[in-house]
C-alpha cells in the first residue's frame, strides 16, 4: 500500500477528532459562564482558559475543514509523483537487468553517437578479428575523412597495405548486400517511395564498395599479416553488425521509405562474455559471430562473382518474369494443380504425353474429381492436348523407346518394333485417357438436355513434347520434358523436373514495385506455345447425341463407340 492510500485512510478520523475537540471547547466555555459564581476568585482565570480552549478548537476545526484539504491535495499530488518516479525507477531497473543479461553495456541513440567508440574498438591494439555486415558500408569506406568511422577504415587499409612487425595475423571479413537480390531490390524501391534518392543509388554505391573490397582483397594476398575477405549476401538486410574480439555493435535495418542518414535507430553495444563466470548471461557477442558465419557460409557469394563472373542470382529475375512458385515435391505440385483446376473460372488448357494422372478411369468417376466436375458443370472451356501415340509418330516412338530401355536390355532404335510400341505404357495410357474422356461425356449426355454440348475438346499433336503445360485462367504451370532418368525400378519418365508456376504479369503481386520483363514473360511465351500446338494438332472425335431411332451415341458421325468405350475402360 502506498503513502497515498495511507493518507486518505487517516483523513476522516482526524476530522472527526477535530469536531469533538471543538464541541468540547465550546461546552467548557458555556459551563464556565453558567457556573461563574460557583468558581469564585477562579472564575476569571477559568473563563480565560476556557475561552482560549474554545477559540483553539474552532480554529483547528476551520483549519481541518478548509485549509487541511488543500494541504492534503497537494500532499496527494506529491505522493503520486513519488509513486510514478518509483515505478519508473523499477521499470528502468528491470530494463537494466535485461540489458545486463544480454551483455549490453551501452545503448546509443544512433550511429553518429556510437562512431567514436566503434572507432576505438576497431583500432584497439589487441584486435585480431573484425567482422562487418552492412549494405554498402559507405560511412566507413567513402565517408568524410574527418569522421571517426572513416578514420577507422583507413587504419584497416593500413593493416592491409603494411605488413606487421610481429607475427600476429588480423582476420577481417566483410559482408555487403548483393544488389541483384530481391532484398536489395525491395530496399532500393522502398527508400525511393517518399524520398528523392535516385532509383539506382543502392546498386551504384554497392558496386563501388564491391570494387573497393575486391581491390583490397588482391592487395591483401601479398601481405601475410592480414586475411581480408569480402562476400555479398543474398537475403533482406536485417542489421548492421560490427564485431571485434571484445565488442559487438548491432543496429537493426528496416525498409525505410526515404533516406535519412541521421535516422534515430539505436545501436546496441555488447561486451564479450566469459561463459565460465557468467553462465546466466546470453552471450550475444558470441551469437552474432554465429549469425555472421551462417550468412557467410549459406547465403552469400564471392565479390568476384558479382563483379567479373556475371552471376545475378534467381530471385529478382524470377519475380520480374512472373514466376511465383517452384515445386520439387510431386505431392505438393499435384495439390496445387487440383486447387487451380477446382477454382477455374473461364478456361483450362492441358498439354501432356498421356495425361493419365488427370484421366485415370478409376479416379475420374469420383463425383468430386475436379476434371469431372468441370465437364459436367460445363462452365469452363477445356482443351486437352495429347501426344499422338501412333507408332508412325516419331516423337511418341522415341519416347516409348526410351521408356522401354528403363526396364529392358538395350536395343537399337530400329529394332524397336510396332508391336513393342503398342505394348508400351505410353500407348496404352493414351488409349485409356481418350476412352475415359469419351465415357465421361457419354454418361453426361444421357442425363443432360438434348441440346447439351460439352465444352471439352481433345487433340493429338505430333510436335516435340517439350513440356507438360497447364493453363488455368491467368496462371500457367510448366514442367520440362526430357529423356534423362536418375531413378531405378521405374517404367516411365515423369515428374523429375521442377514444376514452375508463372502468372500473367498483368496480375503480378509485385506489379508497380519491380520492373517486370514483358519481353521475357514465360506466361506469354507458353500461351503462344499452346496456341501453336493446338492449331497444328489433330482433332480427336468425342461423343455427341444422335437423333437415331435407338438413341445411339456417335463420335461426330463415326460409328457407334459404346462397345469400344466399355471394352477400353474395362481393359
Image (cartoon, rainbow, N blue to C red):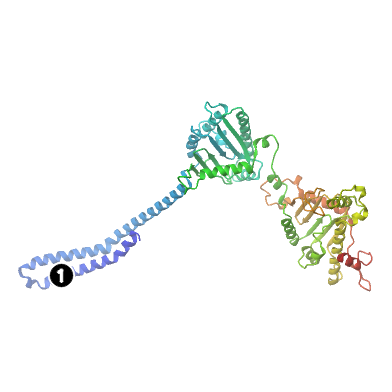
Count up the numbered dots.
1
Counting other residues with Cα less than 10 Å from the Cα at mark 1, is it few (<14), some (14-19), or many (20 or more)?
some
Q: Residue furthest left?
A: 41
Task: Tell me if 423 is positioned left or right of 244 in this view.
Answer: right
Measured from the top left, where is residue 130 in percent x and y? 54, 36
Measured from the top left, where is residue 459 in percent x and y? 87, 57
> In which quadrant of the rendered view does residue 520 lie?
top right
Residue drawn at 65 percent across, 37 percent down: 302
Quadrant where the C terminus sits is bottom right
Measured from the top left, where is residue 164 in percent x and y? 54, 27
> In which quadrant of the rendered view does residue 158 lie?
top right
Can residue 263 be seen here? no
Quadrant where the N terminus sits is bottom left
Q: Choose between 227 and 471: the one closer to the eye.
A: 227
Above or below residue 162? Residue 76 is below
Secondary element at image label 1: helix
Give the labeled residue for mark 1. Answer: 28
Above or below residue 92? Residue 3 is below
Can residue 222 be seen here? yes
Amino acid at each position: 500500500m502506498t503513502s497515498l492510500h495511507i493518507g486518505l485512510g487517516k483523513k476522516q478520523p482526524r476530522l472527526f477528532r477535530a469536531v469533538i475537540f471543538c464541541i468540547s471547547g465550546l461546552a467548557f466555555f458555556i459551563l464556565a459562564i453558567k457556573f461563574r459564581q460557583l468558581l469564585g476568585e477562579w472564575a476569571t482565570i477559568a473563563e480565560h482558559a476556557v475561552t482560549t480552549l474554545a477559540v483553539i478548537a474552532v480554529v483547528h476545526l476551520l483549519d481541518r475543514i478548509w485549509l487541511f484539504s488543500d494541504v492534503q491535495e497537494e500532499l496527494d499530488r506529491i505522493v503520486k509523483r513519488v509513486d510514478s518516479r518509483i515505478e519508473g525507477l523499477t521499470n528502468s531497473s528491470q530494463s537494466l537487468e535485461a540489458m545486463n543479461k544480454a551483455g549490453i553495456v551501452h545503448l546509443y541513440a544512433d550511429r553518429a553517437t556510437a562512431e567514436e567508440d566503434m572507432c576505438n574498438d576497431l583500432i584497439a591494439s589487441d584486435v585480431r578479428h573484425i567482422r562487418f555486415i552492412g549494405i554498402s558500408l559507405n560511412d566507413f569506406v567513402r565517408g568524410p575523412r574527418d569522421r571517426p568511422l572513416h578514420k577507422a577504415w583507413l587504419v584497416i587499409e593500413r593493416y592491409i597495405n603494411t605488413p606487421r612487425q610481429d607475427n600476429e595475423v588480423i582476420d577481417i571479413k566483410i559482408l555487403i548486400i548483393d544488389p541483384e537480390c530481391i532484398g536489395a531490390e525491395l530496399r532500393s524501391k522502398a527508400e525511393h517511395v517518399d524520398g528523392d534518392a535516385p532509383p539506382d543509388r543502392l546498386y551504384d554505391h554497392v558496386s563501388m564498395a564491391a570494387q573497393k573490397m575486391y581491390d583490397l582483397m588482391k592487395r591483401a594476398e601479398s601481405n601475410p599479416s592480414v586475411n581480408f575477405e569480402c562476400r555479398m549476401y543474398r537475403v533482406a538486410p536485417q542489421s548492421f553488425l560490427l564485431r571485434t574480439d571484445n565488442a559487438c555493435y548491432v543496429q537493426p535495418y528496416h525498409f525505410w521509405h526515404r533516406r535519412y542518414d541521421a535516422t534515430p535507430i539505436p545501436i546496441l553495444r555488447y561486451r564479450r562474455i566469459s561463459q565460465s563466470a557468467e553462465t546466466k548471461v546470453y552471450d550475444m557477442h558470441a551469437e552474432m559471430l554465429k549469425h555472421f558465419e551462417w550468412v557467410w557460409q549459406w547465403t552469400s557469394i564471392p565479390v568476384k562473382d558479382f563483379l567479373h563472373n556475371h552471376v545475378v542470382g534467381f530471385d529478382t529475375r524470377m519475380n520480374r518474369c512472373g514466376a511465383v512458385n517452384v515445386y520439387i515435391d510431386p505431392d505438393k505440385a499435384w495439390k496445387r494443380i487440383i486447387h487451380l483446376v477446382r477454382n477455374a473460372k473461364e478456361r483450362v488448357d492441358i498439354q501432356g504425353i498421356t495425361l493419365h494422372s488427370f484421366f485415370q478411369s478409376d479416379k475420374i468417376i469420383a463425383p468430386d474429381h475436379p476434371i469431372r466436375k468441370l465437364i459436367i458443370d460445363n462452365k469452363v472451356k477445356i482443351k486437352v492436348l495429347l501426344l499422338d501415340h501412333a507408332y508412325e509418330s516419331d516423337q511418341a516412338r522415341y519416347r516409348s523407346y526410351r521408356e522401354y530401355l528403363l526396364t529392358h536390355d538395350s536395343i537399337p532404335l530400329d529394332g524397336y518394333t510396332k508391336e513393342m510400341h503398342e505394348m508400351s505404357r505410353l500407348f496404352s495410357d493414351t488409349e485409356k485417357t481418350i476412352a475415359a474422356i469419351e465415357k465421361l461425356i457419354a454418361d453426361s449426355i444421357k442425363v443432360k438436355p438434348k441440346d447439351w454440348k460439352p465444352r471439352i475438346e481433345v487433340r493429338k499433336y505430333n510436335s516435340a513434347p517439350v513440356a507438360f503445360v497447364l493453363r488455368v485462367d491467368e496462371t500457367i504451370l510448366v514442367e520440362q520434358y526430357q529423356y534423362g532418368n536418375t531413378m531405378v525400378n521405374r517404367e516411365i519418365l515423369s515428374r523429375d523436373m521442377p514444376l514452375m508456376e508463372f502468372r500473367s504479369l498483368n496480375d503480378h503481386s509485385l506489379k508497380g514495385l519491380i520492373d517486370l520483363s514483358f519481353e521475357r514473360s514465360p506466361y506469354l511465351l507458353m500461351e503462344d506455345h499452346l496456341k501453336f500446338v493446338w492449331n497444328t494438332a489433330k482433332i480427336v472425335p468425342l461423343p455427341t447425341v444422335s437423333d437415331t431411332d435407338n438413341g445411339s451415341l456417335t463420335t461426330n458421325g463415326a460409328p457407334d463407340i459404346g462397345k469400344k468405350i466399355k471394352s477400353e475402360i474395362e481393359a
